[in-house]
Image (tube, rainbow, N blue to C red):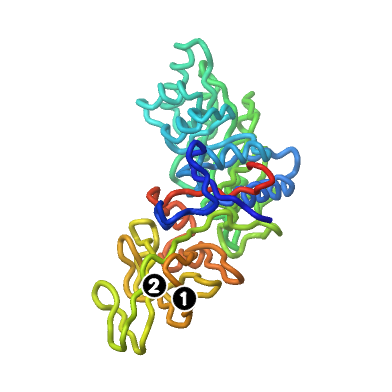
């Protein structure tokens, strides 16, 4: 299948490939792969379980608006963000679907939540009362989801005190309970003991709530790891973020055949240096040539989100791995192309993604960064333009 790449702004011209007149480094999002991933996830879920797509932090680097619009077309019922600004961007793009705003709000944000028609997660009786007052004042109830702390110990009403906060919630006017949720502290590891304990605590809270006369239209607990490995915890809705982009939360999670990474990072060779034996490369002179060498410069550095490493890691050029040499600088990194004499200035390199039969995964970069894949994906800075790859048979 052939593809055409389009820039993030659809009002701009549409080059067939990023040209050297623009920045010769970019993040590429394959919307065809992203759509296929959503179809596979939706098909894998029971029909009665709804799908919420978490698009916080620009949908893990892919662009919240484009990815969110696509998700809704492919069967997602809800989106989720973390900040008012993220919610505002979706609304400004014309997205009218239900948007959950995760985390906890402060009183100063209530007006913004109401104006944008976001659904807040309420983690305390104090904030529940404030949203209640706002609903009574405007004579229209505020839709909220009740957040329960079942062991993550970050946000949420304590599960141990469900008998106390349940009646207090249910006597409030001005709010409409649209759902109840909690969050796994450990769902993507082999040992699911604590995750199952959290599920039991959540079920206990649901039972107390319903026994007191409360309704829970949507109960939800699963993130990507929980969705994959804990089907008994699917309830009414699952929250998927990382997985939709084709990256698994850990190496031990269940695999869905066909899921592929939708985001890749590319650059073009902008300079080539000829070195003699003994010549060094980069700040601190951390790499020394032991033979006559050719060194290619790629215009991506730690200022763009690449791990700040020395003499570690690889890039893909001409379908082969080439080693990073010297230290990664803020704006550039260097690779040894001595064994690829055909490489010239302008050649395309892949820093994350596939080229030919080789692939550099987000997991590989996470090891370099001594972090997690989530950090790698959201770490690609906005100064790397997002280029959307679409099938020529139709816009995605």
Q: Position of residue 283 (x, y in %)?
A: 25, 72
> For the point 71% across and 59% down, which residue is it?
257
What element does badge 2 sit on? strand
Q: Which x, y percent locates residue 278? A: 28, 87
Q: According to the image, label 2 marks what residue?
A: 296
Q: Bin the neighbour count of mark 2 within 10 Å (Cα to Cα): few under 14, some 14-19, many 20 and up.
A: many
What residue sits right under mark 1 in the picture? 322
Which of the two labelled residues, at mark 1 and mark 2, occupies the earlier sequence position?
Answer: 2
Query: Does residue 307 appear left or right of residue 238 in this picture?
Result: left
**C-alpha gap between disc 1 and disc 2:** 10 Å
Which is in the foreground here, disc 1 or disc 2? 2
Point out which mark residue 171 bears.
none
Q: Nearer the viewer, residue 303 or 48?
A: 303
Q: Nearer the viewer, residue 42 or 322?
A: 322
Is 141 positioned to the left or the right of 330 in the image? Answer: right
* 282 sits to left or right of 375: left
Q: Is residue 81 above or below residue 271?
A: above
Q: Secondary structure at mark 1?
A: strand
């Amino acid at each position: 299948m052939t593809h055409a790449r389009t820039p993030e702004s659809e009002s701009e011209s549409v080059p067939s490939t990023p040209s050297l007149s623009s920045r010769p480094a970019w993040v590429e999002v394959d919307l065809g792969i992203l759509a296929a991933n959503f179809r596979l996830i939706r098909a894998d879920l029971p029909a009665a379980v709804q799908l919420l797509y978490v698009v916080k932090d620009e949908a893990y680097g892919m662009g919240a608006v484009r990815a969110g619009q696509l998700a809704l077309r492919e069967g997602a019922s809800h989106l989720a963000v973390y900040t008012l600004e993220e919610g505002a961007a979706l609304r400004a793009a014309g997205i009218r679907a239900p948007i959950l705003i995760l985390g906890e709000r402060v009183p100063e944000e209530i007006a913004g939540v109401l104006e944008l028609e976001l659904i807040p997660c309420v983690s305390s009786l104090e904030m529940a009362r404030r949203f209640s007052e706002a609903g009574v004042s405007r004579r229209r109830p505020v839709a909220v989801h009740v957040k329960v702390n079942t062991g993550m110990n970050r946000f949420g009403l304590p599960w141990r005190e469900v008998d106390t906060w349940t009646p207090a919630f249910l006597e409030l006017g001005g709010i409409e309970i649209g759902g109840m949720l909690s969050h796994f502290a450990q769902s993507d590891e082999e040992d699911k003991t604590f995750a199952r304990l959290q599920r039991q605590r959540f079920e206990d809270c649901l039972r107390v709530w319903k026994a007191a006369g409360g309704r829970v239209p949507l109960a939800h607990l699963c993130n990507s790891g929980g969705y994959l490995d804990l089907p008994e915890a699917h309830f009414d809705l699952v929250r998927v973020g990382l997985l939709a982009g084709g990256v698994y939360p850990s190496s031990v999670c269940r695999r869905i055949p066909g899921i592929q990474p939708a985001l890749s990072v590319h650059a073009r060779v902008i300079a080539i240096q000829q070195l003699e034996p003994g010549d060094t490369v980069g700040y601190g002179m951390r790499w020394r040539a032991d033979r006559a060498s050719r060194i290619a410069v790629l215009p991506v550095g730690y200022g763009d989100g690449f791990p700040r490493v020395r003499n570690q890691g690889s890039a893909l050029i001409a379908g082969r791995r080439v080693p990073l040499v010297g230290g990664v600088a803020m704006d550039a990194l260097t690779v040894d192309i001595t064994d690829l004499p055909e490489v010239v200035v302008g050649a395309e390199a892949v820093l994350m993604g596939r080229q030919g039969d080789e692939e550099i995964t987000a997991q590989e970069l996470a090891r370099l960064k001594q972090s997690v894949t989530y950090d790698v994906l959201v770490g690609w800075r906005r100064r790397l333009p997002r280029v959307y790859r679409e099938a020529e048979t139709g816009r995605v």
